[in-house]
Amino acid sequence: MKVGIFDSGLGGLTVLKELLKVSKGIEFYYLGDTARVPYGIRSEETVKRYALECTLFLKEFDIDLLVIACNTASAKAGAFLRKKFPELPIFDVIEPAVEEILNLNPQSVGVIGTPSTVGSKVYKEKLLKRKSNIKILQRATPLLVPLVEEGFLKGPITETVLRHYLSDWKDKIEVLLLGCTHYPLLKEEIKRLFPDWVIVDSAQPLAKGLKPLLQREGNNKVHLFFTDKTAFLERMLTSIGLKEKRIKIVKW
Amino acid sequence: MKVGIFDSGLGGLTVLKELLKVSKGIEFYYLGDTARVPYGIRSEETVKRYALECTLFLKEFDIDLLVIACNTASAKAGAFLRKKFPELPIFDVIEPAVEEILNLNPQSVGVIGTPSTVGSKVYKEKLLKRKSNIKILQRATPLLVPLVEEGFLKGPITETVLRHYLSDWKDKIEVLLLGCTHYPLLKEEIKRLFPDWVIVDSAQPLAKGLKPLLQREGNNKVHLFFTDKTAFLERMLTSIGLKEKRIKIVKW
């Protein structure tokens, strides 16, 4: 079985990593749009156009299902892609995180993400639809992606930025939802600063949900495609411990 | 006379602002590639391709001269564009800053910019070629662009980040060169933290150098084009006090 995954850049590799852990005999095609990252600061129209181009690229490999491994693209282009490709099963990173939070049954949740994801209110609306008495705070935290991409996973700058964004939520939330695939790389530092919170990200719930579909024969195969070869690429592959290195740079 | 200006996004508006101050009767066509900003993290090949597309777009308006208002594009694609368009006068933001620094005749200079600009060593090489006994320190400061784009022009985060990047240069340099068109918006804060430094940016020296060419009859006109309509657009236009609002969103 062939699974296509796309992301605005490198953050979606955290999703691929979790999928690989639960898969057997699956061929993964990952496309990171590093020539146009980040998506989270762009308009809905532009995100839809980019997401469509990524999907068309992956469909050339006859993929059997598609994973949108980017919260911004999931929020802004998920419905659009499902309508455009009714025959293709499309998973995104929003639903699994919503399920995970509902399983935890908290009274209060904080959602952080890119300006685009948070502006879409997708998490807030989906959670309230299923559990109307939950208190939801949300906040755009746009400096976190550059911090991760620059390798500032801890230290004084990261601490200052995290405290700036999150300190006033300290006693106000029980669960923090990491609404961006870059943020899991900051999980340890967030845990250290705010030890009382349960931290939820999309990658593990998504992998758990997809696991039954991903059991075949033999080893997994990974094909990595990026639209630009950037300095962060090797660093990110190393930092998430992804060994596969069949990397191709594609242009459009 | 028609002047084309392009930048990876909004930073080049600081250059346009200075050019408007010294111009009379000039028609400016500004293109900000907000759908693909930032350029500073991309490969040379990709920056060249994007810069070429920007130039071809502006050439459609029969521009008489071109200003590359982006340090990354100047460093990575300046020579490439000059070779490609031998008939078009092309100015960039590197040369004027180099001239300004040589006029100041310092013993030591610190250069900050995007990873791409700093990696190109363009400032270091051009300065050393003209004045071999100058001490040049350089450093990539990639968090500064996101800070500016998010409106963190002062405050604890900006101070922490600036101190992180610059504190060890405190007694080592006389002049700091802001090698990115976003950085002038942080000038006041840098001055406050490091009052002994002379701070040089490209916009004013470029405007000073171009002034003799930009004296015609009547009022200036400004046409602003962007490849995406982002949340930062209005904020940036306001923060640099640009009143002209003939904005078009172009797609490619």
Image (cartoon, coloured by chain):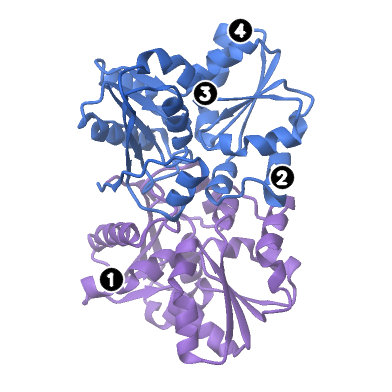
Chain colours: A purple, B blue
Q: Residues within 10 Å of mark 1 (few under 14, many from 20)?
A: some
* Disc 1 residue type (three-letter): Phe
Q: Nearer the viewer, residue B202 or A174?
A: B202
The disc, 4 or 2, on the residue closer to the chain's N-terminal end is 4
The answer for how far apart the CA atoms under marks 4 and 2 are is 33 Å
Residue B76: x %, y % from top left: 42, 28
Read off the residue under disc 2: B159
Read off the residue under disc 4: B131
What residue lies at 20% left-to-right and 32% top-to-bottom? B60
Q: Nearer the viewer, mark 4 or mark 2?
A: 2
Q: Nearer the viewer, mark 1 or mark 2?
A: 2
The disc, 4 or 3, on the residue closer to the chain's N-terminal end is 4
* Disc 3 residue type (three-letter): Gln
Read off the residue under disc 3: B204
Q: Chain of mark 4?
A: B
Question: Can residue A6 be seen here?
Answer: yes
Question: Can residue A208 be seen here?
Answer: no
